[in-house]
Image (tube, helix red, strand yellow):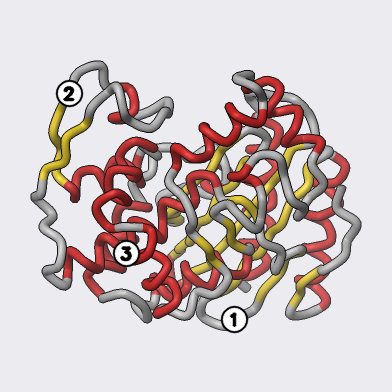
Amino acid sequence: MIDGAGIVGSDAALTAVAEAIARDWGERGIGGHFLGCDLNSGRQCGFGADEPVALASVAKVPIALTALELIDRGELDPGQTIEIDPAKTSPGPTGSALFGFPARIAVADLIALALTVSDNAAIDLVLDVVGITRVAAALAGWGCDGIQIRHPMRTMFDSATRAGGGSFELALELAIAGPPGSASAIEALDPQRGNVASARGLVELLAAVWESRIATPAACAELRRLMSLQLFVQRIAADLRSDAIRVASKTGTFLNLRHDIAVVEANAGVRVAIAALTKAGRRATHAPDVDLAIGSAARSAFEALRG
């Protein structure tokens, strides 16, 4: 599923690492795109880094950053409470998406839920307040041309339900059958209609946030803090976290997509940004082997890039 095309390597050793990761993913039946970048030197390794890919919950990162910037500029009250109506909330397995009774939660707390437990309902409520147009304008203003946010999280589930005639199992079959990068019967997976980004675009976003080159310094700092608190650490962080290594990340999972983006930091100022975007070629509600493959790839890239 990965033919070695589009290999990125700043030198022969990094090219070899990228080729090894691509070969490992291909042997496991995993399609995907990968990029690791040392934020200090700019050295890189990866493959397929420029192809737009449906984001799933990774889309929550630019939405959250837009809201955090508005908060820091005084244009959005972090304490403004939003009503959560269980009859109308976006579906999801965590956070306020599971609420059975009406509640009100502050905007800042909704952002925290969206990034730490990947709460779909929370980020959609934030997006309702901020607006898709403002997110798109923010990304354009930041020069993030490799990222497109076009719809809320609820659209992922609605489009899958429609395409599968009410069956998520059929939607999964359609997702697996769809050729990579092509138009899909499922709107959220279509590069022309869904929330999409390239691995390079995501790494560039992370680099800009970690260096406070976009939004405002306070907004970038809060995004870094919240990403460091994400509870789902079974992918990039799985083989890296220790007392000496810190990982701030955001996962994305939908149908056969399993993604993770992160900045991995170590002592002596080491900072490596990683985007791992995968598409499994088989039916599986749970795919720990894909998670492990992402973790192994991240470890290989980090060790090679830290020098």
Amino acid type assigned to the residue bearing label 2 in the image: Pro
Quadrant of residue 95 within the rendered picture: top left
Amino acid type assigned to the residue bearing label 3 in the image: Thr
Find residue 251 and report its horizontal and vertical position in percent.
Answer: 50, 45
Find residue 115 and report its horizontal and vertical position in percent.
Answer: 36, 46
Front residue of this view, candidates 125 and 107: 125
Mark 3 and mark 2 lie on one chain; the one further toward the N terminus is: 3
Which residue is found at the position 76% from the left and 74% from the top?
9
Pointer 3 residue:
66
What label sits on residue 223 in the rendered view? none
Mark 2 and mark 1 lie on one chain; the one further toward the N terminus is: 1
Pointer 2 residue:
102
Contact (Cβ within 8 Å) of mark 2 with mark 1: no
In the image, is 114 to the left or to the right of 43? Answer: left
Front residue of this view, candidates 225 and 201: 201
**Which element carries disc 2, helix, strand or loop?**
loop
In the image, is 42 to the left or to the right of 21? Answer: left
Determine crowd level at label 3: few under 14, some 14-19, many 20+ residues with C-alpha closer than 10 A: many
**Which element carries disc 3, helix, strand or loop?**
helix
Find residue 48 and report its horizontal and vertical position in percent.
Answer: 76, 63
**Which element carries disc 1, helix, strand or loop?**
loop
Which dot, 3 or 2, sits closer to the camera?
Answer: 2
Pointer 1 residue:
42
